[in-house]
Amino acid sequence: MFMKTKYFKRFALTDRLVSIEELRHIAQMQARMDELVRYSPIQHLSDGYSFSMDEVCDTEISFSDILWAEGINAEHSSLHMKNGETIALPFGTHGLEILLSDSKEPRFLKISRDVFLPVSMIKKVSRKVVYLKGCNISFKVSVTYFPNLFYGLYEYLTARIEKWCVQDYIRWKVK
């Protein structure tokens, strides 16, 4: 499966000739990104259903369009989208975790040190592996993060059940 990846331009010199004005724009963007990452893992605008990072790109990204996410290292992470595109982000796993925690729907679960899955996309699950709808990749569940998966999945599956307590049950039975 071929995946298109959208990278943010970084300041670099290569064998290809480029104009100073083009480099100025890239250098200024890089400096703003470096400042963002230095003082805050990320600065983004989110309503809980979509987000945008004005300093990085002008595209609004819907949380529901994310198939899964991974932290690559301390400075890079990726969003794997449902349409097959991969978006590279200029911050690491910690920043990615902060970004995904803003999502109201879907909720993302961390199943290993660097993999986040939307709970609503889980098709099959066991103690050791998770499969997502529309994805042929099997995701290994870390022993450390199994409780996170277990409780997150339980909360998701029972979210619409009406809560009751023992007193309500007793009153109902007495009537």
Image (spheres, rainbow, N blue to C red):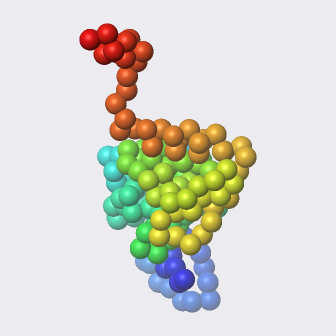
**Viewer-proximal residue among 86 and 55:** 86
Q: Residue at x 54, y 89 (%)?
A: 17
Q: Is residue 175 left or right of residue 126?
A: left
At which x and y percent is residue 166?
42, 15
Question: Which quarter of the rendering shows the C terminus?
Answer: top left
Instruction: Count the numbered circles shown.
Output: 0
Measured from the top left, where is residue 113 in percent x and y?
Answer: 67, 51
Residue 64 appears in the figure: yes
Left or right of 135: which side holds 169? Answer: left
Q: Position of residue 82 (x, y in %)?
A: 43, 69
Q: Nearer the viewer, residue 148 or 24?
A: 148
* Closer to us: 81 or 76: 81
Give 76 or 120, whichever is nearer the viewer.
Answer: 120
Vertical placement of 150 versus 96: above or below? above
Where is residue 172, by image quadrant? top left
At a point 44% along the width and 61% down the height, the residue shown is 66
Res. 113 visible in picture: no
As drawn, is 26 to the left or to the right of 172? Answer: right
